[in-house]
Amino acid sequence: MADFPSKVTTETGSPSSQSSPQGGNSLRGLAANVTTMMDMSFIRSIPAILMMTEIFLGLLQWALIASAPYTILPAYGWVMFVAVTLWLLTTILFFMILFSAPRKLTAVPWPLTVMMYQGIATVLYLTAFLANAASVHPFRYSYFYGHMAAAAFFGAVVTLAYGASAFFSYLDWKGDGGNAATSTVPT
């Protein structure tokens, strides 16, 4: 039994690949680690597609408003606050779910948290959309009328996307979206 440790090797790869000066294999290993951490089934789900829609169109909405002199109307301060804040929070939530944070942070009731977030975001975006749509008229004869009108349109689409996300989050929270084992993580 005294010879046992000298006969065992714990090396899992070839010595040349671990000491590669170019770093080619270590870069492949890093890419493999990142894709292993990602929840690829989430990307193909309806809630993920809705979140990507919210992120893209939300960015488009607040970029259109930011390109105009929106400070002349106080309503656009609220619209910009809601659009930028929810854009940031949705982006963070998307990447948290993508990188399997719900599986690592089990103390958080993820289905309830996501449902509450999506519901609150829907109400906030509805108020921002209404403020945006009601405030387009003063820009009627200016160059920025098209910007504000397009921002109102995208605000309506993002509001609908948040509403659909809230509905799917509700189904996930109630457990109607699958079996009990998969209903603990938003899909």
Image (cartoon, rainbow, N blue to C red):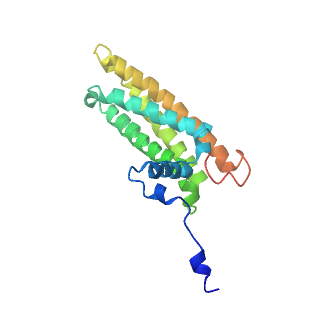
User: In the image, is residue 48 above or below residue 100?
Assistant: above
Reply above or below: 42 against 148.
below
Residue 45, image quadrant: top right
Q: Residue 113 at x, y = what percent?
A: 55, 52
Identify which residue, 139 or 43, lies in the foreground. 43
To which quarter of the image does residue 133 belong? top left
Q: Position of residue 78 (x, y in %)?
A: 36, 37
Residue at left offset 59%, top offset 44%:
40
Which residue: 58% across, 79% down? 5
Using residue 65 as the reference point, say whether residue 49 is left or right of it.
Answer: right
Query: Of 175 and 19, which appears nearest the observer?
Result: 19
- The percent coordinates of residue 155 (x first, y second) are 45, 29
Task: Please indicate whether residue 12 sits to the left or right of residue 131 in the image.
Answer: right
Which of 70/57 is in front?
57
Answer with left or right where residue 135 lies relative to residue 97.
left
Q: Does 72 appear above or below 104?
A: above
Identity of the residue furthest to the right in this view? 179
- Which of the image's four quarters has the N terminus? bottom right
Residue at 45% x, 43% y: name it. Answer: 91
Q: How many labels does the image show?
A: 0
Extreme residue toward the top, this view? 141
Spot occupied by residue 187 in the image (x, y as percentages of width and height): 62, 45
Q: In this view, does 179 lie to the left or right of 9?
A: right
- Residue that extends furthest to the bottom in the rendered view of this protein: 2
Q: Which residue is drawn at 60% across and 76% down?
A: 7
Closest to the observer: 151 or 91? 91
